[in-house]
């Protein structure tokens, strides 16, 4: 029976790539146009949200926002969430209605088709290159000036050890937010690892709960505060995840 379940999970996971890739191919001409100039980015972003919603629906996922949504239209934020799954980006797109730009690792530009649009719409960073990290600041300011939000997953990676609740945070989120004086929006994705981790023999359709935690203001902070606000954000997200794990254990 377990062998059959693993086969079905394998087919289900292949379906993810089929749906995600097929939509991109169908929309290819429109995507090329919408990624040709920054003034088209809001339209591209809404099309990306449509893509994310279709993929989540096709996989049997239902995103549920737990609690209040304090995000104000027309205001730039630094969005930040725990990173455990390929579907984290799709969930972020589903939750955040207003245009934001992802900051991501440069290596993803090598992916077929997706990489082409990735490099045209995201802020790329080579973490081993100091000059690249400097350019991220400039690119982020350019996007913020145009009214866009920024999204960075602060762990900077998906931990290979799935027993890790929350990996240590990098400085990028907090340095950028302080430098550009934009509020940080910490978010927790409770279920993405359980529903669609990188372990191919695990996962299932179901609910994906998201909670937006207290917004952290940076207007009056300087770079000497980046470590303290990083610690605050980490503890907020870690404690929320631990509390949820404990609650689910108590139910069993």
Image (cartoon, grey):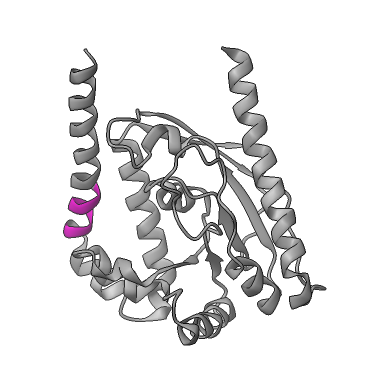
Q: Is residue 67 magenta?
A: no
Res. 247 visible in picture: yes
Residue at 68 percent across and 79 percent down: it is 179
- The spot of residue 86 in percent (x, y) is 37, 48
Q: Residue furthest right?
A: 220
- The spot of residue 65 in percent (x, y) is 57, 38
Taking the image as shown, residue 20 lies to the left or right of residue 230, namely left
- The spot of residue 192 in percent (x, y) is 45, 39
Residue at 17 percent across and 26 percent down: it is 7
- Quarter of the rendering occupied by the N terminus: top left
- Quarter of the rendering occupied by the C terminus: top right
Q: Is residue 23 magenta?
A: yes
Residues shaded magenta: 20-25
Residue at 78 percent across and 75 percent down: it is 224
Q: Nearer the viewer, residue 233 or 17?
A: 233
Please, is residue 252 above or below residue 40 in the view? above
Please, is residue 235 above or below residue 75 in the view? above
- Number of disc labels: 0
Taking the image as shown, residue 146 lies to the left or right of residue 132, namely right
- The spot of residue 18 in percent (x, y) is 18, 46
Magenta stretch, main secondary structure class: helix
Res. 213 visible in picture: no
Taking the image as shown, residue 89 lies to the left or right of residue 134, namely left
């Amino acid at each position: 029976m377990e062998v059959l379940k693993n086969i079905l999970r394998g087919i289900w996971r292949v379906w993810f790539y089929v749906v995600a890739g097929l939509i991109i191919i169908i929309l290819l001409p429109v995507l090329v146009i919408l990624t040709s100039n920054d003034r088209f980015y809001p339209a591209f972003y809404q099309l990306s949200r449509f893509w994310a919603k279709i993929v989540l629906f096709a996989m049997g996922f239902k995103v549920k926002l737990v609690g209040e949504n304090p995000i104000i239209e027309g205001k730039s934020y630094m969005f930040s969430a725990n990173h455990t799954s390929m579907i984290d980006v799709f969930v972020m797109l589903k939750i955040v209605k207003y245009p934001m730009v992802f900051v991501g690792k440069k290596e993803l530009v090598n992916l077929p088709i997706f990489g082409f649009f990735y490099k045209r719409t995201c802020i790329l960073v080579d973490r081993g290159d100091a000059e690249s990290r400097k350019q991220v600041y400039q690119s982020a300011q350019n996007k913020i000036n145009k009214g866009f939000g920024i999204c960075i997953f602060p762990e900077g990676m998906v931990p290979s050890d799935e027993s890790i609740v929350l990996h240590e945070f990098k400085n990028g989120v907090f340095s950028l937010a302080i430098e550009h004086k934009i509020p940080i929006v910490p978010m927790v994705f409770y279920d993405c690892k359980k529903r669609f981790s990188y372990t191919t023999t695990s996962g299932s359709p179901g609910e994906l709960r998201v909670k937006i935690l207290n917004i952290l203001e940076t207007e009056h902070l300087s770079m000497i505060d980046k470590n303290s606000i990083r610690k605050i954000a980490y503890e907020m997200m870690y404690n929320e995840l631990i509390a949820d794990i404990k609650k689910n254990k108590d139910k069993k």
